[in-house]
Amino acid sequence: MSALPWEQTPLGPRADWPVSLCAAIDLMLGAGAPGALFIGPQLVQMHNLAFDALYRDGSAATRALGRSLKRDDPDSSLAKAAGEVFAGRSILLASQGWTIGASPGTPAFNLSCAPIRDESGQVGAMLVLAFPVTSPARLDAGASISELQHRVRNLLAVVRSLVARSAESSDTVEDLAAHLDGRIAAVARVHGVLLRNPHAGVDLEGMIRDELLTQSADQDRLNLGGPEIVLPPKAADLMTLAIHELATNATKFGALSQASGKLDITWKLDQAGARGQQLELVWMESGVAIASQAPRRQGFGTNLLKRRLPYELSGEADIEFRPGGVVCRIAFPLAPVAAMGSSSVWGVTTTAGDDA
């Protein structure tokens, strides 16, 4: 897909694609189900590997990339469904006998079609997820599709809010672009996990290791330790952003920027009375040659840690710029995975069944 000359399609050069489209592509590529995007008025097609595998003819899959569904197959059920989806409605094409290609024996699929909105809130693409009609889990297909659609709406709501809040704390366009790319990528990784298994939550240690891996952290200078913790979706959204901001700061200015630096990340569960179990995570840097000083203004990361995370998760967070490195403590009640299914980041709240 990356090798396709997209500048020759209605989408234009990849460098000009908006942030919302790039986030939607990441989401589609990481989906556990076969998925495709149909983008813009011409319904330009992209799809993931699982969708690609549905084509009996591999060359047909290649030809489908970048094609205009509106131009090449305007009478198809998908092209007709796009009219409703671009009006803002999620629809299910159930038991339509829809197949990939015309090969005999190709299974039919139910198709979940959901709108993908851009930075302005307008529908810019249609996300399609395919589920075999003959699947043993067909009785649960409606609930699964609804959950996947909910995840898609949540992710795009978070992306739009990240764009707005990052813009508020950025002095230049270059500064905005540099920070926004990493933040959206961090959130997309978490939602990729949730899409593959919406009810399983997100493993805390795996999330932390993934973020440190993207920062190319030296494993010999890291110490991670704590019990196995599974975060519900809302907590995972906020915690991945918090870890991303701390790791980015450490890579630029702190323990991960100097050979003498070390980073300890530990977590535990405590009983919190009537509130049940409470997760406490401590991020501690040491060995930084120059004593750290608190920044003169509160940026995105500090605001997230001191204001939004405590408010959204009913917890608390402190960050200290000590000689030798940053120390941050985060604590909040750990609700069951199924009890915190909505995402509420930076004042954008969505619940199942709502359009973000």
Image (tube, helix red, strand yellow):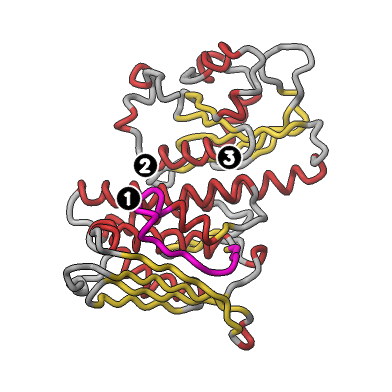
- Residue 93 appears in the picture as rendered: no
Q: Considering only vertical position in the picture, is 103 above or below 194?
A: above
Side of 192 relative to 110 (left or right): left
Q: Nearer the viewer, mark 1 or mark 2?
A: 1
- Residue occupied by mark 3: 31
Q: Considering only vertical position in the picture, is 166 above or below 97?
A: below
Q: Considering only vertical position in the picture, is 211 above or below 1?
A: below
Q: Which numbered dot is residue 23?
A: none
Secondary structure at numbered mark 1: helix
**Quadrant where the N terminus lies?**
top left
Q: Residue at x 43, y 73 (%)?
A: 282
Q: Which numbered dot is residue 19?
A: 2
Secondary structure at numbered mark 2: helix
Question: Viewer-proximal residue, 101 or 58?
Answer: 58
Q: Which numbered dot is residue 180?
A: 1
Which residues are drawn in magenta? 211-230
* Contact (Cβ within 8 Å) of mark 1 with mark 2: yes
Q: Is residue 78 magenta?
A: no
Q: CA distance from mark 1 to mark 2?
A: 9 Å
Q: Position of residue 195 (x, y in %)?
A: 60, 46
- Residue 175 appears in the picture as rendered: yes
Q: Residue at x 38, y 26 (%)?
A: 11
Q: Earlier in the sequence, mark 2 or mark 3?
A: 2
Q: Considering only vertical position in the picture, is 302 above or below 101?
A: below
Q: Amino acid at mark 3?
A: Ala
Q: Amino acid at mark 2?
A: Val
Question: Viewer-proximal residue, 314 or 90?
Answer: 314
Q: Quadrant of residue 137?
A: top right
Q: Earlier in the sequence, mark 1 or mark 2?
A: 2
* Badge 2: residue crowd in 10 Å (few <14, some 14–19, many ≥20): some
